[in-house]
Structure formats: structure tokens, C-alpha cells
Amino acid sequence: MSVVVLISGRGSNMQALLEAGIPVSAVISNIAGAAGLAVAARRGVATGVVEHRRFATREAFDAALAAEIDRHAPRLVALAGFLRVLTPAFVAHYAGRLVNIHPSLLPEFPGLDTHGRALAAGVKRHGCTVHFVTAELDHGPIIAQASVPVLPGDTPATLAARVLQQEHQLYPRAIRWFLDDELVIEGDKVRVKGNHAQMVASDRA
Ligand code: GAR
């Protein structure tokens, strides 16, 4: 019983999961040429492609995607740079076992271009969030967050790189908690058993 990871591109978070020893049974993408698929295949992980552009509706795509995922009978489905909005039916099918990593300190900056928007807003700290996925985009119960400073002279690219380093630490840790049955969902909040920090503040530039 392991993890299926969904990607749309580079797959650096997926790679971080593999390098941390997370048991990943398959990596599936909605984009045939996603660079991360080759990374997974080189490491001997099964890969799959379900191209959204081949389906007339979101519902049909999500049903095909779920069928491909369920062949692996995963305990957890992890979105890692999977850039598709999922239907309520898909989200309900994986209720409580579908997680995402988002490059902002939710509930700030849901959606796209989070780093540019953080700079435009003048925030002094920015970061990333791992959360359970619910039907409302980027709004599910928060499992863990990591924050970094926003520095003078930052561009969206420099800020993204600083946040990404934290993503690569945070996502494996949060998924390990899930697999070890350490997460307790209480309403719309998530508590972790034991003495684990759910908020990490990095001051490294
Ligand atoms: C990551 O920064 C991830 O947080 C973000 O896409 C990037 C994927 O990079 N996800 C989202 O924006 C989801 N809304 P990766 O393919 O190298 O992991």
C-alpha cells in the first residue's frame, strides 16, 4: 500500500519523495512529455500517462485518471505540480487520501503565479503548504507549512527557488506522517501526533 504521485512537468517534488524513500508505486502525468516521467522511469518506478486533451470533458478525464491510479491500489495520492483542476467526484473518491503541495502560505495566494503575487503584495515571508485536497481549489485542511524570508532584490525566480528547497523537505515529511498514521483530522484542521513541528521557519537565504 503505497503512494501514487501525479505530475504535470519537471517533477522535482516527486524526485524528492523518491530520494526520501517514500514508497511510490507509480508516477502518472496528464502530459506525455512531462520531464518528471523520465526521472521516475530511470529509477525503476512505473509511469503512466492520461492526457487530458484526449477527453471531451473534465469528468471523462478524471474518470480515466482515477481508473489508472486505482490499478495501483494506492493508500495515498500525492499531487506534485499537477496543474489540473479536479472534479468534485474525483476529490470525493479520494477523500482523506489526496494531498497537494502548493507554493504559498495558504490561505494566502491560492492559484497560479504565487511568487509574483507575493512580491507584488510586499509580504516579508512566503513559503509552501502541504494540505488535504477538497473540492475548493487550494483550500483543504493544512498538514504542514514552511516559510522563508522575502529578500530585497528577489525576483519571482529567486523566491521560487528558495521556496522549492523547502518544498523538497516538507512534502516527504508530511507524507511520511500520513503513512505512519500520525495525522489526525479534526474538522477542517489537521494535528500530528507526537512532537512534530507542523510549521517550519527557515531563515536561510
Ligand atoms: C512546485 O513549486 C509546486 O508547489 C507547484 O508547482 C511546482 C512543481 O514543481 N504546484 C502548484 O503550483 C500547484 N498549484 P515540480 O514539478 O518540480 O515539483
Image (tube, rainbow, N blue to C red):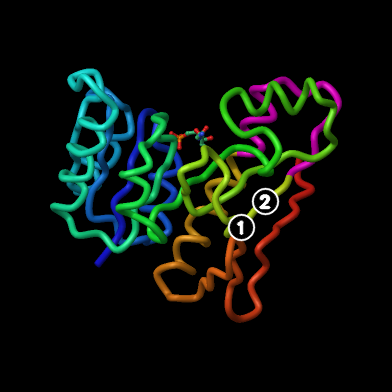
Q: Is residue 118 left or right of residue 85?
A: right
| Residue 157 part of the magenta-drawn span | yes
Q: Where is residue 7 shown, x and y percent of the image?
A: 35, 36
Residue at the spot x=61%, y=23% of the render? 113
Above or below — where is 178 with respect to 116?
below
Name the residue furthest left.
Answer: 71
Q: Amino acid at mark 1?
A: Ala
Above or below 161: residue 69: below
Q: State if disc 1 and disc 2 touch (CB < 8 Å).
A: yes
Q: Residue at x 81, y 25 (%)?
A: 121
Whether residue 134 appears in magenta in the rendering, the answer is no
**The residue at label 1 has a CB less than 8 Å from ligand 1:** no
Given this view, does label 2 or label 1 mark the residue nearer the observer? Answer: 1
Residue type, numbered disc 2: Ala
Residue 202: percent from left, percent from top: 74, 51
**Disc 1 residue crowd, few under 14, some 14–19, many 20+, Cα 10 Å:** many
- Can you identify the residue that label 2 sits on? 146
Q: Which mark is residue 74?
A: none
* Front residue (pair 173, 38): 173
> Which disc is residue 144 wearing?
1
Q: Position of residue 126 (x, y in %)?
A: 74, 39
* Left or right of residue 178: residue 184: right
